[in-house]
């Protein structure tokens, strides 16, 4: 599936920005980002091997690793525990690395929408779909974490004022 591959490529760029930041806490994220890139390759293989129409041996080889989701959720919790509570919406941004992680989040959401039909048809596992769903949450939390550690401010959303409110 092309969108998963696209996401993996965007994540590669985000990872490079994290490395270039020189901020130890951000650079320390790189092994986790590389693990996610590997899981995205697993996901691409899983999607390319439809459960109902592929030989059982191929389906078995292309199974999505069931332990991926708990690992991802643990990482989300670790990063989120270090962030200030959100009290309003924020705009994507917060430096190059964080901005690119927001791009990853939006591409991930698109990939998730594309997989809905395959999930409904029983062509992919529920684990793979849940992983992609939580991965977009990871990218949001990770972008916030990177902004914080890079000392880049989060930009709050400001609602437009209607003409009668001005």
Image (spheres, grey):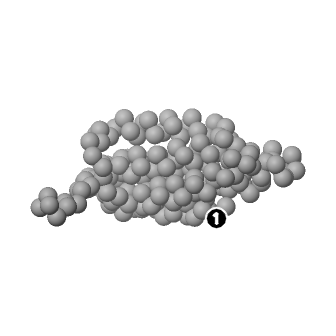
Q: How crowded is mark 1: few (under 14 residues within 10 Å), some or many (20 or more)?
A: few
Residue 37, given in percent of the width and then of the height, sits at 58, 54
Q: Can residue 11 be spotted in the picture?
A: no
What count of labels does the image hold? 1
Locate residue 103 relative to residue 7 in the image: left or right: left
Compare residues 39 and 163 and report the one nearer the observer: 163
Residue position marked by numbered label 1 in the rendering: 2
Q: Can residue 147 be spotted in the picture?
A: yes
SS class, disc 1: helix
**Residue at image location 86% in from the left, 46% down from the top:** 56
Compare residues 30 and 123 and report the one nearer the observer: 123
| Quadrant where the image shows the N terminus | bottom right
Compare residues 89 and 166 and report the one nearer the observer: 166
Taking the view exactly as shown, the residue that stands out farthest to the left is 166
Residue 22, given in percent of the width and then of the height, sits at 36, 57
Residue 137, given in percent of the width and then of the height, sits at 46, 46
Taking the view exactly as shown, the residue that stands out farthest to the front is 164
**Residue at image location 84% in from the left, 52% down from the top:** 54
Residue 108, given in percent of the width and then of the height, sits at 53, 55
| Quadrant where the image shows the C terminus | bottom left
């Amino acid at each position: 599936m092309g969108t998963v591959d696209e996401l993996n490529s965007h994540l590669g760029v985000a990872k490079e920005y994290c490395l270039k930041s020189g901020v130890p806490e951000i650079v320390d994220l790189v092994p986790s980002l590389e693990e996610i890139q590997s899981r995205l390759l697993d996901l691409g293989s899983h999607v390319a091997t439809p459960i109902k129409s592929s030989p059982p041996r191929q389906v078995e080889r292309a199974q999505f690793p069931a332990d991926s989701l708990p690992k991802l959720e643990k990482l989300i919790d670790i990063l989120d525990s270090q962030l200030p509570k959100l009290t309003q919406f924020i705009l994507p941004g917060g430096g190059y690395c964080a901005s690119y992680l927001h791009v990853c989040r939006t591409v991930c959401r698109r990939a998730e929408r594309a997989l809905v039909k395959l999930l409904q048809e029983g062509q992919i596992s529920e684990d793979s779909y849940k992983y992609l769903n939580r991965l977009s949450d990871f990218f949001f939390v990770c972008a916030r974490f990177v902004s914080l550690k890079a000392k880049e401010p989060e930009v709050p959303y400001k609602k437009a004022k209607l003409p009668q409110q001005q």
